[in-house]
Image (cartoon, rainbow, N blue to C red):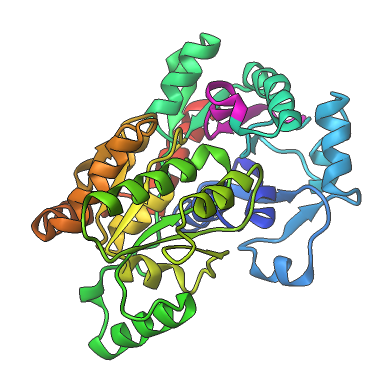
Amino acid sequence: MPTITIDYTPAIRQSAGIGRIVRGQVDGLIRGSHSYDFRLFVSGFVTKAERASAPLPLHTTPISERNMVRIWHRLNLPFPQIEWFTHSQTDLFHATDFVLSPSRARKKMLTVHDLAFIHYPETAMPTLQHYLNVVVPRSIHKADHILADSQHTANDIVDTWHIEPARITVAQGAVDHQWFCPAESIAADSLNAEQTRVRTWLGIGERPFILGLSTLQPRKNFVRLIEAFHQARQESDMPHCLVIGGSKGWMYDKIYARINELGLADHVLLPGFVPDDLLPALYRTAEFFAYPSLYEGFGIPIIEALACGTSVLTATNSCLPEAGGPGAIYVDAEDVSSIAHGITQLTQDRQLRERLRVAGLAHAAQFTWDRSAQQIVQAYQKVLS
């Protein structure tokens, strides 16, 4: 039975985004693929709780993750190799987060989630942008095979580094449909209770709201979303507030400044990190989900919203149409008036929201972690054959 070592570090370190993708895909692999002996590697230290929550035993390093990054990727040293920590030879090493660490594995696979650091370098911290520009191309050329989160990301990789398309497999993200499900799947009493909980948490009473969600950082385009919301309020008599959930990331000061400059302190809420147990209820309670990002590798929040029966406003760029499908309306992410027009459409047209809701539920249903895992297994089979 071939042994596959998977870098599980982002699943431990990142609660959302890439961490959620890696957790979902690994769970799907373990659940559905019995032809491989999987090992999970984590760079740095882990807690007892993190070990207990992992689906398999974790093989860790006695050195912090930060120092491992310095040794492997900033100094570009070929040691220590992954096998030093897993204490066994591996047939395939799967690096899940942009960079390939040293390994003696017979074959090496790399997941590249997006190329935002190339297309929108101004939205990343300069040190991170420089680091990725060095280590990602190096890792891509060392890997035997590459996984991409979307067809758009796969095309980006081909165009940027002239990689043969046969070396790339698309393994899309997904959602847990038992958790992210529409209101009609929930008993009326439970639905009322969750909506009350959401509205109490936000402190908005019965006021309708538009939901935005992500770490606060420039690429998510929240400044333009706020400006578009302001323009839509001026052009129509809409009672909605805008809720932007997510932790502070980087370069987020302009978000707070723009809210104050436009006098929107009573109309734009930034409640911070959204607990996982509140997230589906937040989607279900929102009138619609607004995600006009400048660039994404996949866009899992879009699928989460659609799976909860919530219509979506998103942008025409990158992979976003792959994620939104027929359950979204599409705007120009760099045009405030375009975003404002989309907001006005969705706040005023209940029939449009319903059409998008029905189409979005059908579209989201195909995105399961078992399907995503099967896409990865096909890549494993191809590489190991």
Residue 10, magenta (yes or no): no
Q: Is residue 53 above or below residue 252?
A: below
Total labels: the figure holds: 0
The residue at the point 42 percent across, 49 percent down is: 226
Snapshot quadrant of residue 100: top right
- The residue at the far left in this view is 351
The residue at the point 20 percent across, 75 percent down is: 184
> Which region shows up in magenta?
103-122
Snapshot quadrant of residue 47: bottom right
| Residue 213 percent coordinates (x, y) | 46, 55
Identify which residue, 263 or 274, lies in the foreground: 263
Residue 313 in view of the camera? yes
Identify which residue, 3 or 118, lies in the foreground: 118
Residue 116, magenta (yes or no): yes
Identify which residue, 317 or 78, lies in the foreground: 317
The residue at the point 79 percent across, 61 percent down is: 46
| Residue 136 percent coordinates (x, y) | 66, 24
| Residue 174 percent coordinates (x, y) | 40, 51
